[in-house]
């Protein structure tokens, strides 16, 4: 069916792992909410987040990375429930679960108001993310996406860190609602086309839809609706307008981590856009890649202009997301594999940087670069962590970014020639430029009066940054298992476009 | 081979850097000294274990690192690289001693970074897999960035640190692309250097790879016009760090080890490019010496001139040129690095390395002044110093292959010598005017030790170069033969 095959869960595991994976955070959220603001709620929140992470690890161990089939599949007749995972989804799932766990630790260390409710919302968002990552049904994907967006909107409303949050919130809702509507529109085109072809049988299932992609203009329309819907979410230049404001005024670290720590936009493109509208993808590939290359540099230039560390990071995200899109749309095995690994790397690294920014904000009450100075003397660990996360984004050897960027470059040499490859690789150097510049101004510059009063690094801060760093460096030096995990899925995906 | 000697050598400094955190901060420099001495011992052991007439790559260690990409952890040395190991170990030891009494804040971090830098540098010389090489190559940037940005003396040091980092990162882009290109052009993609050396590539691939590699290494060498970071670096960095940067000839080593042998036909075609860049760099560096008033910047310019000469020697594409180039690189590592360290001693006493603030320094500091003179003369290739044999061979080879360029380089050498002597006269002779100079004390025992080791190496190798050249010669001949096909 559409070139997909699947292995059902009872052949691989004793329990329907994916169902558990989706239910655990939802149940956790209900329990945490029931305990209201008691300290038990916080403990339960952490335990559930940790449990979800362990469950993801079990899934990663259970699946067979050599097989290109979708695995641990579950199908129920009701509402077209159909879930399965392959190497790609496992990588994204692990990142999502790890980040949520770190966010629960981080949320505690920042001492935020009503932590119980915060944890409940966090778990709802996690449920949304996990749902998007395991479902094989575009309609379910859209539904989970709505759930997660609702959670983030709620976070922004209740825990905003500055007065201008209303503006940021409005911008966020406008953009996301529009993107979501586009995506739903794309789903409807596909579903209607399926109904048209099969005589009134509506379906949004990936397996059904991939078998008979719409013809001609309908396919182009579906491609554009789905692609731009996801591009808002990703965010892809020039649809990134919601991110800088949200980053500057929203709840530090938590909201950005949920929106951009896990690159579900990129995942959606890989899982749905590429297989469902193959001809349109091939036709529009040069334009998408051209825009992405422009985006790498345009947003890097914007990042140089920022005076606020949080806004600067937001533009850094948009810049590197463009690189991911180049990888996905290379339609080449190495490029797709690189994009998946790089997405995981960026997610971890950027979230790590957000954590450090949050810790700095707790001390200084500001993230304006002009007002920060001499932090290296007081919090050297956080400073070094910030720099290492930054270097991971740049693709320094020893971080997961290196092998991934290496794969994308390999793919783009094959597809687009050496010149444009050099150009996109230089985009990385530009990113290194603004990150180093920010690092210098905030951490290395000589301390101004008053700067020396900030607290030393706290144990919880060591823990949060330490886990993220350890995860990153371990993957960086032992890339092999991750390459192995994603290899078959990348081959299968690239095989759809082999000429 | 039961002991993985090269791994031990490369990772001893890293082990030291880890152990630093277990001891109190005031013991940091002693532990660093122990780690560096152990590294020197390991480097000497590698030198002893190396058989000049044996197989090309020796002490090879190989294990799979990233299987899907066919990347190996592979170390090994040949005659071209083996002498760089003890030279590097010595240079780091000298750097440590030169900064011994400077009160570094956060000493453990400082010394850990220095050891990390040593680990990466030794790795560059030993790596036989292009990805591993690139890994070590980029790994030098992080410690350098911090050592310069955090412990830099001058006000512009943070800026210089960023600039260095970005310039080198940009230089890394063509290198990585070249390595990917080389790997992809094999039937089975591989990053294994000995394998890559054995398989001739089609001409267009070679040309692309050679140009990319040249662009990447030229930044580090540095070849004019990609040299502009170096004078700024030399001014902003602490003296000991400048000694490392000027003393470690990584860029030229990269050309020798990778760019030319991996793309021999393209290199032969583009010999004019290499020779031209080399000649321009020699003369530019020499004129730069004349134009400076700061001894440190002028030494940096001398370093530029030196590597230009070495690149010119490589462009001769024969064994004699390669032998001369390696001998010169080693000699310049010692002499220029040593001169930088002596300048650091001078700066610690007088607070400046600008000739306007010096003058008459030889009266109060005769030992320092004479030591600096010897290093300087070695830098211009005076007979009796370690540079002479290499320079002589190199110039002979170049005069035969590129007569015009050779003549121009000789002219550049003459300018460099004149520039050095003129600066030396202004800084060390004449009446002493400033109090810092008249009241300065001469070298202390610790600094004495550095000077004696330097002089022994410079004069000893200068008078008796045979055994050292014999270590390099077979490898240089193999290198020349690899090009002649």
Image (tube, grey):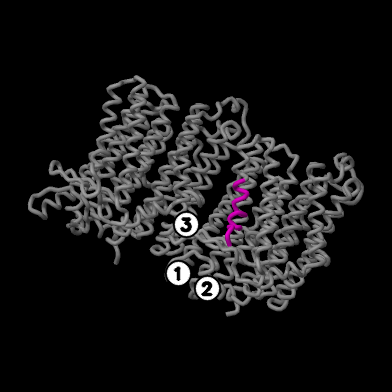
Based on the displayed image, in which of its 4 quarters is residue A464 positioned?
Answer: top left
- Residue on which the image places disc 2: B198
Q: CA distance from mark 1 to mark 2?
A: 13 Å
The residue range painted magenta reads B1-15
- Residue on which the image places disc 1: B185
Query: Is the residue at mark 1 from the same chain as the one at mark 3?
Result: yes
Mark 3 chain: B
Q: Residues within 10 Å of mark 3 (few under 14, many from 20)?
A: some
- Mark toward the start of the polypeptide (1 vs 2): 1
Which residue: 51% across, 43% down?
A388
Q: Residue B396 colored magenta?
A: no
In-front residue for pair B311/B87: B87
Percent from the top left, x then y, of residue A426? Answer: 49, 54
Based on the displayed image, in which of its 4 quarters is residue A283 positioned?
Answer: bottom left
Q: CA distance from mark 1 to mark 3?
A: 21 Å
Tell whether label 3 touches label 1 (CB within 8 Å). no
Nearer mark to the viewer, of 3 and 2: 3
- Mark toward the start of the polypeptide (1 vs 3): 3
* Residue extending furthest toward the top: A38
Percent from the top left, x then y, of residue A134? Answer: 26, 44
Q: Residue B13 colored magenta?
A: yes
Q: Secondary structure at mark 2?
A: helix
Which residue: 55% across, 37% down?
A383
């Amino acid at each position: 069916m559409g070139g997909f095959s699947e292995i059902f869960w009872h052949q691989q595991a004793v329990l329907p792992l994916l169902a558990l994976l989706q239910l655990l955070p939802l149940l956790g959220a209900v329990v945490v909410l029931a305990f209201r603001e008691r300290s038990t709620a916080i403990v339960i929140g952490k335990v559930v987040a940790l449990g979800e992470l362990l469950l993801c690890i079990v899934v990663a161990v259970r699946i067979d990375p050599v097989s290109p089939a979708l695995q641990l599949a579950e199908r129920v007749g009701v509402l077209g429930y159909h879930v399965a995972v392959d190497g790609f989804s496992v990588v994204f799932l692990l990142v999502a679960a790890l980040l949520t766990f770190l966010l629960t630790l981080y949320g505690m260390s920042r001492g935020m108001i009503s932590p119980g409710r915060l944890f409940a919302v966090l778990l709802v968002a996690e449920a949304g993310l996990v749902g998007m990552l395991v479902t094989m049904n575009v309609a379910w994907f859209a539904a989970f996406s709505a759930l997660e967006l609702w959670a983030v909107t709620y976070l922004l409303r209740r825990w905003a860190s500055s007065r201008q949050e209303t503006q940021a919130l409005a911008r966020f809702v406008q953009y996301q609602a529009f993107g979501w509507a586009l995506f739903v529109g794309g789903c409807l085109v596909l579903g209607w086309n399926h109904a048209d072809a099969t005589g009134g049988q509506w379906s949004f299932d990936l397996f059904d839809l991939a078998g008979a992609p719409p013809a001609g203009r309908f396919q182009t329309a579906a491609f554009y609706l789905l692609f731009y819907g996801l591009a808002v979410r990703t965010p892809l230049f020039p649809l990134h307008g919601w991110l800088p404001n949200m980053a500057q005024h929203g709840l530090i670290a938590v909201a950005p981590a949920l929106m951009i720590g896990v690159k579900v936009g990129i995942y959606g493109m890989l899982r749905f856009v590429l297989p469902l509208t193959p001809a349109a993808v091939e036709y529009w590939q040069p334009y998408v890649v051209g825009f992405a290359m422009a985006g790498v540099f345009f947003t890097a230039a914007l990042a140089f202009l920022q005076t606020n560390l949080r806004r600067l990071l937001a533009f850094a995200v948009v810049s590197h997301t463009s690189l991911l899109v180049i990888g996905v749309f290379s339609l080449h095995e190495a490029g797709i594999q690189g994009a998946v690994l790089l997405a995981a790397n960026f997610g971890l690294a950027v979230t790590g940087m957000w954590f450090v920014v949050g810790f700095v904000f707790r001390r200084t009450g500001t993230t304006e670069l002009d007002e920060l100075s001499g932090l290296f003397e007081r919090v050297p660990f956080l400073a070094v962590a910030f720099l290492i996360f930054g270097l991971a984004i740049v693709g320094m050897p020893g971080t997961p970014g290196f092998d991934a960027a290496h794969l994308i470059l390999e793919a783009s040499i094959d597809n687009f020639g050496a010149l444009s490859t050099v150009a996109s690789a230089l985009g990385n150097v530009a990113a290194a430029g603004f990150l180093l510049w920010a690092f210098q101004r905030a951490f290395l510059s000589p301390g101004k009066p008053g700067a020396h009063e900030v607290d030393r690094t706290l144990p919880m801060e060591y823990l949060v940054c330490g886990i993220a760093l350890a995860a990153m460096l371990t993957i960086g030096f032992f890339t092999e298992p991750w390459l192995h995990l994603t290899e078959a899925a990348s081959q299968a995906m690239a095989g759809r476009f082999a000429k | 081979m039961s002991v993985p000697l090269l791994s031990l050598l490369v990772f001893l400094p890293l082990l030291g850097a880890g152990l630093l955190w277990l001891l109190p901060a005031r013991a940091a420099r002693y532990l660093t000294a122990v780690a560096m001495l152990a590294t020197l011992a390991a480097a000497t052991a590698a030198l002893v274990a190396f058989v000049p007439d044996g197989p090309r790559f020796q002490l090879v260690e190989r294990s799979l690192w990233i299987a899907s990409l066919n990347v190996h952890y592979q170390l090994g040395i040949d005659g071209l690289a083996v002498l760089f190991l003890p030279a590097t170990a010595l240079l780091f030891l000298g750097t440590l001693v030169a900064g011994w009494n400077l009160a570094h804040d956060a000493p453990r971090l400082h010394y850990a970074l220095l050891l990390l830098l040593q680990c990466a540098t030794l790795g560059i010389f030993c790596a036989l897999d292009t990805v591993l090489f690139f890994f070590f190559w980029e790994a030098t940037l992080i410690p350098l960035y911090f050592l310069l940005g955090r412990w830099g003396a001058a006000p512009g040091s943070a800026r210089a640190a960023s600039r260095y980092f970005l310039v080198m990162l940009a230089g890394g882009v063509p290198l990585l692309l070249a390595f990917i290109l080389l790997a992809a052009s094999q039937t089975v993609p591989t990053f294994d250097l000995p394998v890559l050396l054995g398989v001739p590539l089609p001409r267009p691939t070679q040309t692309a790879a050679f140009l990319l590699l040249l662009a990447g290494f030229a930044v580090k060498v540095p070849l004019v016009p990609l040299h502009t970071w170096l004078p700024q670096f030399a001014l902003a960095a602490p003296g000991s760090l400048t000694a490392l940067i000027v003393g470690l000839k990584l860029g030229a080593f990269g050309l020798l080890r990778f760019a030319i042998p991996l793309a021999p036909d393209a290199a032969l075609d583009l010999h004019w490019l290499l020779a031209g860049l080399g000649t321009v760099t020699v003369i530019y560096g020499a004129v730069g010496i004349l134009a400076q008033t700061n001894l440190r910047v002028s030494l940096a310019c001398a370093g530029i001139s030196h590597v230009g000469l070495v690149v010119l020697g490589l462009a001769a594409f024969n064994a004699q040129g390669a032998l001369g180039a390696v001998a010169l690189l080693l000699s310049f590592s010692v002499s220029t690095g040593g001169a930088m360290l002596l300048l650091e001693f001078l700066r610690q006493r007088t607070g400046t390395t600008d000739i306007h603030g010096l003058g008459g320094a030889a009266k109060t500091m005769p030992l320092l002044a004479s030591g600096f003179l010897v290093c300087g003369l070695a830098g211009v290739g005076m007979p009796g110093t370690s540079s002479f044999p290499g320079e002589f061979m190199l110039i002979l080879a170049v005069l035969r292959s590129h007569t015009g360029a050779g003549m121009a380089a000789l002219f550049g050498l003459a300018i460099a010598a004149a520039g050095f002597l003129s600066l030396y006269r202004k800084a060390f002779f004449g009446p002493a005017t400033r109090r810092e100079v008249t009241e300065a004390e001469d070298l202390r025992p610790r600094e004495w030790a550095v000077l004696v080791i330097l002089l022994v190496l410079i004069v000893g190798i200068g008078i008796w170069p045979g055994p050292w050249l014999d270590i390099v010669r077979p490898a240089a001949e193999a290198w020349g033969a690899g090009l002649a096909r």
